[in-house]
Structure formats: structure tokens, C-alpha cells
Amino acid sequence: MAHALPSPCDPGSAQVIPARSIRHPTATLAATILGSSLAFIDGSVINVALPALDRDLHTGPEGLAWLINAYLLMISALTLLGGAAGDHYGRRLLFLSGIGLFLTASIVCALAPSLPIILAGRAAQGIGAAMLLPNSLALLGSAFEGETKGQAIGTWAGVGALAGAAAPLIGGWLVDALGWRSIFLLNLPVGLAAAWLAWRFVAEDRDARGAPMDTVGAFLVTAGLGISTWALTVAATPDAKPVLTIGGGTLGLALLAAFGWFELRRRENALMPLFLLRNTTFLGVTLLTLLLYAALGGLVVLLPFVLIRAKGYSPVEAGAAMLPIPILIGLGSRTMGKVTARIGGRLPMGLGAFMVAAGLALYWRIGTADASYWGEVLPATLLVALGMAVCVAPLTTTVMSSTDADYVGVASGFNSAVARIGSLIATALLGFVFVQESQIALVASAHAAALVGAALAAVAGLCAFLLIDDGPGAGPAHG
């Protein structure tokens, strides 16, 4: 799932860390898996709790969107800065600090008496995830070498996928049995175990190379994304004032344009290395990632909400409805990695994106009467899952092969950030669905959102076929 599972190029960030001798590589692997699982669990578990949160805290459509986006905004904008901070100040230090902030924020969310408090907690969780996630991968990359590094990264990604898949089921059961506050307390034993292992067995590691951190870029992209997301979210509310939404959107886009200009000037020292987009293959895979993960990110938030609110599903049933996606991605990625090595990534990514588009369009069949999961929900979900399973491994491989070896790490981080930004934008636009009060209007709006998602996925497929080049003339992106 878009923000519940490891993003397509997250593992690539661990590939370029110089290996060194570690006394306890197994404990390091366990610590990084548990720490990263915090981010993956929290990215998916809240989706099944949205109706309960809306009922208890009276969030309204704008608040529902921000329950997702307060977290996504911070992890989207600050993950690359968190990795750079770890290089300078110590990866273990940032990893432990991120866990500490995440767990503190989880307690704030669990005890929150009002919407503003829980939104502050969600934002703090996102900052903590942005600190711990890239540094967990960096620590993992330095703990192993050779063939064992690939096995460790595969284990990390596989367990992360399982955590993201299990979280909605466990979260749904907790919401049913104990209430929504319990889902945030689920983080405590996982985080404490990760922190103890890291403190006890993981040595400090840093790679300061003299380049200053891009704090100005981090501020510009966070402010630009935040204001733009606010404008999109507010635009969906009935009493939205056009002057405020248009003004906010214009300011947000201006800040993002300033961010782009500033990043181009920093070149190799940029938070997001935009110069890599000069390569058409990297540009194509970036556009595909943005559009495809926007479509998927909207789906994983919208479908459980509609099934619970309009169809009477329990939270655990709604969580189970999404299971085919992480399961098929996990099962299919290894096979598609071998296929990509033979035929390249262009054809699998293009066909996979079109399959996702077809699956999203099939959600239009969910009617206003009692929805049959087996006849209406499952076929569409299976098609989306199969399309993503075809896409993910080729996407990762294409990103890493389209850049010079010196830029593989930053290109992977760039692509992961783009995937999360796609989910952020999609969730902001879901306010147009959340605002519907009647079941008929809610389902009709969900149909429209599914068709928009299908169109985005179809355009992603076109980007693959038109821009990505698997041939020998496709040179790597460089500065």
C-alpha cells in the first residue's frame, strides 16, 4: 500500500552505504526491521479507524483528510533530510531519536481529547518516521556486505510488507474490541524493542562528507506541500472561501517553485536532486511513481472508509478487504525482478499500470445495495494488486539503473519521496468524498474518485511507454 508498505525505492537507500565490521549484524537487522515497522504499521492502521475517529472527535471531512496527511506531509518532506542528518550526526542517534519521538507522539495520539491534539501527534509521528526510516536502512546497509546484504534488505522489505498487511487486520480488531485509541498504543512494544536492540547492540555510524545539510530546501518543500495540501483539503468543504483556497494554492505552488529553483542550484548537495530529471527514463519513472502511487494511496484510504461507512463492514472486515494488495506485491516482486533482468522495465511497468487502471475502474461496480465482497470488491482489488505486483520490482530496478552509481542512493530516496507525495495529494483530494453525508452520495463520489484514480494510473502507463527507454542508448542520469 502506498504509505503502509515500503515505498518502491526505499531498499535502494541501503545499497550505497560502505560496509564495515559489525559485532551483532542479526541484532542490527532485528532493530531496523522493528523500527521501520513503526512507520509501515502507522501508515495503514489508521485507515480502518477513520469512521470511529470521525464519530468520537467530530473531525468532519477536512479533519479526516488531515489525520492521514499530517503524518504523510512530514514523512514525505523530511525523510531525505533525516537521512542527511544521520550522515552528519550519527545514524544510530537519529534512529533512536526518531523512535523516541514516534513513541511519545503515539501516546499523545492515544490520549488526545480533541482533533488539534491528535493532529499535532500525527505530525510528530511523521517527523519521527522521517528520522528513523532512512537511518534504519543506512544502519542495515553498513552491517552487511556482499550476498548477505541483499538477503538482509530482502528480509527488511518482506517483513515491512507483512507488517503493513497485518496492521489493518490487527487495527480493525482493536478498534472493534477496545476503541480507536488502542491502535496508537500498538506502537509501544514494537518501538521499545527496537530501541533496546539498537541501544544495546548497534554501534554508532556516520558518513559526514562536508556538504551542509539542505535545511532551506527542507523548509521550502515542507511549507509548499503543507500550504498546497491545506488548500486542496479546504476546497472540499461546503463553506470554502475561494479567495483563501486560491490564494493558499498559489502561495503553496510558489513555494514549491522556489524549492525547485533552489534545488537545481544546489545540484549534488540538494535535498531532492532535480537535475536527475534531465534523463528521460528517470523522468518517466518519476512521473509513473507520482501518478500510480497517488491512485493507490487514494484507494487504500477510500475503500475501507466506504465499506465501513456506507456498507456496514466492521473495521476488521474492511482491513481484510485490502489484503490481496500487499500479499500479491510480496509474492510477485521476486519473479518480476527476474523478468525485468531479461526484458527491461518499460513493458512490465506500462502493462502493470494499465492493469491498475482497469482494477480501479472496476470499483465503479460497487452499488448502493449490499456490496458483495466476492463479486464486486475482490475482483477489482485482485486486478489492482496484480498490476502493482507487476510494477514494483521493475520500478525499483529502473530507478537504480537509470542513474550513475554515485547517485543511486539519492535517486532511490527521491523516488520514495515522490511516491509519498503522490499519496499526500490524493488524500487531500478525498475531502470531496468525505464531505458526503448520505450513503448514496458517498458511493457516487467514491465511484468518481475511482475513475479519477483509473485515469491517473492509465497516464502512468503512458509515461512508461513514451518516456522509459530500456535500450543500450539510454544513458544514466548525471549532473
Image (spheres, rainbow, N blue to C red):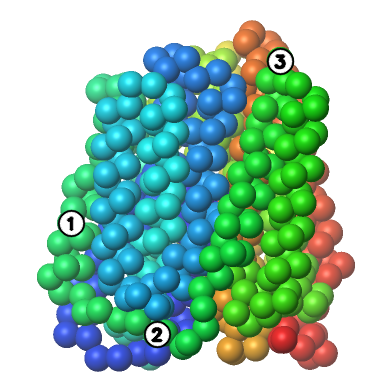
Which residue is at a point 83% across and 66% down the rendered structure image?
465
What amino acid is at disc 2? Asp
Q: Is residue 37 visible?
A: no
Secondary element at tag 2: loop
Please rate how many residues cluster around mark 2, counting C-alpha atoms within 10 Å: few if below 14, some from 14 to 19, many from 20: some
Please, is residue 310 above or below residue 224 in the view? above
Please, is residue 189 above or below residue 8 in the view? above
Please rate how many residues cluster around mark 1, counting C-alpha atoms within 10 Å: few if below 14, some from 14 to 19, many from 20: some
The foreground one among 450 and 223 is 223
Which residue is at a point 26% across and 62% down the rendered structure image?
96
The foreground one among 353 and 76 is 76
Q: Estimate the x, y position of residue 247 in percent, counting from the top left.
A: 78, 36
What amino acid is at disc 3? Asp
The residue to which callout 2 is attached is 207
Cα distance between the residues tagged 3 and 1: 46 Å
The residue to which callout 1 is attached is 193
Quadrant in the rendering for residue 176: top left
The foreground one among 342 and 279 is 279
Q: Is residue 194 visible?
A: yes
Q: Estimate the x, y position of residue 372 in percent, counting from the top left.
A: 57, 22
Quadrant in the rendering for residue 22: bottom left
Q: Estimate the x, y position of residue 330 in percent, counting from the top left.
A: 47, 59
Q: Estimate the x, y position of residue 349 in percent, counting from the top left.
A: 71, 64
Point out the tag, 2 or 3, that comes first from the N-terminus.
Answer: 2
What amino acid is at disc 1? Ala
